[in-house]
Amino acid sequence: MTTLYPATTNIGKFAEFKIAAHAEGVEIDKLPGIDEMPEPIEDASTFMGNAEIKARAYSRLAPGLLVLADDSGLEVDALGGDPGVHSARFADRLGFEPNAGYKDIRNNLCVLSLLAALPNPSRSARFVCTLVIARDGEILLRSNGTVEGQLLDKPRGASGFGYDPLFLIPSLGLTLAEISKEQKGQLSHRGNAFRSLLAQLHNAHF
């Protein structure tokens, strides 16, 4: 069985990979030593660029292993595609209440405050995920996934992480923070990108 080692310490992301991989007969395991590995500087202008930076950096520190790296985020049409590649540190980047609680909460409040300052803003948005598999610093596979939705004017739901409580799936009438992990795996940007990547992996010869 193929084993992939996600280059992330984000518990939520790791759990999503684990669920998606199980359905496809792929093993997900913690990257050995990741807690002590230096984080590479993600300074690319695209999600794919940042995913490739992480994949190359971490795979060089884990010889022989298939390292899975991702970069993902929220694109809000009314904000010109922001937060985009800066999604994880959006509030800090804008200097928005830097000491006001947990990072995810501040990021959500920051996006809501920007939308509130606009006259009748569009609420359309999407989550984007790019995934890369690398070994020994060499990029082997790439994939992309998206999910379209709308932003609420206040968070809803206790599951998920990041911007999930704001992101409504119109066909369900529920946010990504209100659905089960299994359902999220079927609908989410990360689930879509991962299934695309695994389809490539099953046909790969390396």
Image (tube, rainbow, N blue to C red):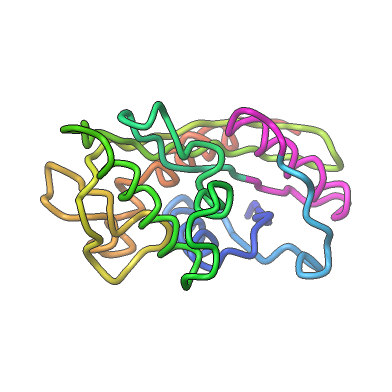
- Residue 52 in view (yes/no): yes
Q: Quadrant of the N terminus?
A: bottom right
Q: Nearer the viewer, residue 205 or 142?
A: 142
Name the side, left or right, on which 185 lies relative to 44.
left
Name the side, left or right, on which 51 lies relative to 150.
right
The residue sitting at 24% across, 67% down in the picture is 157
Residue 203 falls in which quadrant of the image? Answer: top right
Q: Is residue 32 above or below residue 140?
A: below
Q: Quadrant of the C terminus?
A: top right
Total labels: the figure holds 0
Name the side, left or right, on which 8 lies relative to 113.
right
- Which residues lie in the magenta part? 43-69
Q: Is residue 155 above or below residue 66?
A: below
Q: Nearer the viewer, residue 135 or 1?
A: 135
The residue sitting at 32% across, 68% down in the picture is 159
Which percent across, then down, holds residue 44?
69, 31
The residue sitting at 88% across, 54% down in the picture is 61
Q: Nearer the viewer, residue 101 or 174?
A: 101
Task: Indicate yes or no whether the magenta region holds residue 61.
Answer: yes
Which percent across, then down, holds residue 93?
58, 48
- Residue 204 in view (yes/no): no
Which percent across, then down, holds residue 27?
59, 59
